[in-house]
Image: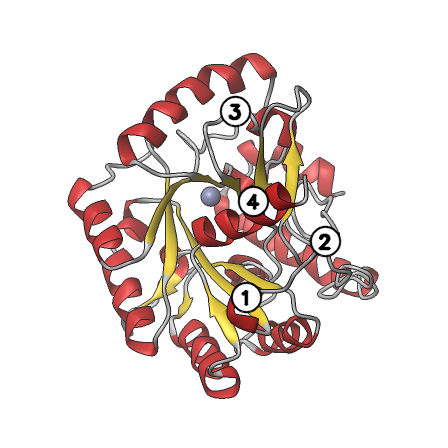
Amino acid sequence: MTRLFYLLKPIIPRRVQLFLRRFLVKKQLKQYKAVWPILAGSEKKPENWIGWPDGKDFAIVLTHDVEWGKGHDRCRDLLELEKKIGFKSSFFFVAERYKVDKELRKFIVSEGFEVGIHGLKHDGKKFKNKKIFSERAIKINQYIKEWNIVGFRSPSMHHNLEWIGELDIEYDLSTFDTDPFEPQPDGVGTIFPFWFEEKDKRSGYVEMPYTLVQDFTLFILMKEESPAIWIDKLDWISKNGGMALVNVHPDYMNFSNLRESEEYPVEYYSNFLKYVKENYEGKYWNALPKDVAAYYKNIVTMNR
Ligand SMILES: [Zn+2]
């Protein structure tokens, strides 16, 4: 059913798509109880694991895919909100879908936050075949250089880690521990970063799965009205010393009272951050993905 849906998706009107996806998710929720939101075994620590820096219990990594101009124009508000609560995050822009403001990128970095790239066009074509991928990889590498960044997340979480190796990156974020609701639903089954070694063995990069479900799935498809599912999972991740990595989209966050469809009140997210702060102050490492990647790469290199 899921495969059929994604096959027909391009010709189905958005409103009908949403209705169908909600219907699908409702059915899947019962079916996947044993593997979502927590997959048993995913808490197993990586080989040679030495723990998080400064003896912190767990890591929390906040990331944002910016889908459209609408989300782009909300980045400052989102950054200010996170900063006020005491967190920092990373923003991933689609290079050629809307205009990415240079000043905005500079502002994000100057605030101690991070910028990454979320594909070139986000039109679903990139992973269609190797040829298209490689052509786009060249362009993406140009942006990586121009923007002076090291991280990538592919549109719609398409993940062919071998292909992604063509990008000049330190890390990739196109996977998840467990998320059977995704179009490409195979999870990597770990709540820790891992090293992806390319076939030539000359290079590799750090892969970091998201471990808290995406906001769209949680608030738009499942229609949850609080961050309770995130909080439960975070408690479990902290107990197991893992990495809580979330992908929330400014496009779906509502900062005012005029809420459009496919938006949720930003308080669902800020309340989650406040929960983390109030309950785990001093115990977590709120790191940018580039910092986690550098830290983990170092562990891998030390063990060679
Ligand atoms: Zn996206």
Q: Is residue 49 above or below residue 4?
A: below
Quadrant for the N terminus in the image: top right
Mark 1 Cα shell of 10 Å, populated few (<14), some (14-19), many (≥20): many
Q: Name the amino acid, label 3.
A: Lys
Q: Name the residue under label 3.
A: 125
What is the number of the mark on residue 48? 2
Q: Residue furthest top?
A: 131
**At which x and y percent is residue 228?**
59, 79
- The residue mark sitting in front, 4 or 1, is 4
Q: Out of 104 and 261, give the one closest to the viewer.
A: 104
From the Cβ of disc 3, is ligand 1 less than 8 Å away?
Answer: no
What is the number of the mark on residue 297? 4
Q: Name the amino acid, label 1.
A: Ala
- The residue mark sitting in front, 1 or 2, is 2
Q: Mark 1 points at which residue?
A: 59
Q: Is residue 186 above or below residue 271?
A: above
Q: Name the amino acid, label 4.
A: Lys
- First along the sequence among labels 4 and 2: 2
Q: In this view, does 50 lie above or below 96?
A: below
Which image quarter: residue 263? bottom left
- First along the sequence among labels 2 and 3: 2
Does 161 sit left or right of 269 as displayed?
right
| Disc 4/disc 2 C-alpha distance (Å) | 12 Å
Badge 4 marks a residue whose secondary structure is: helix
- The residue mark sitting in front, 4 or 3, is 4
From the Cβ of disc 4, is ligand 1 less than 8 Å away?
Answer: no
| Disc 1/disc 3 C-alpha distance (Å) | 33 Å
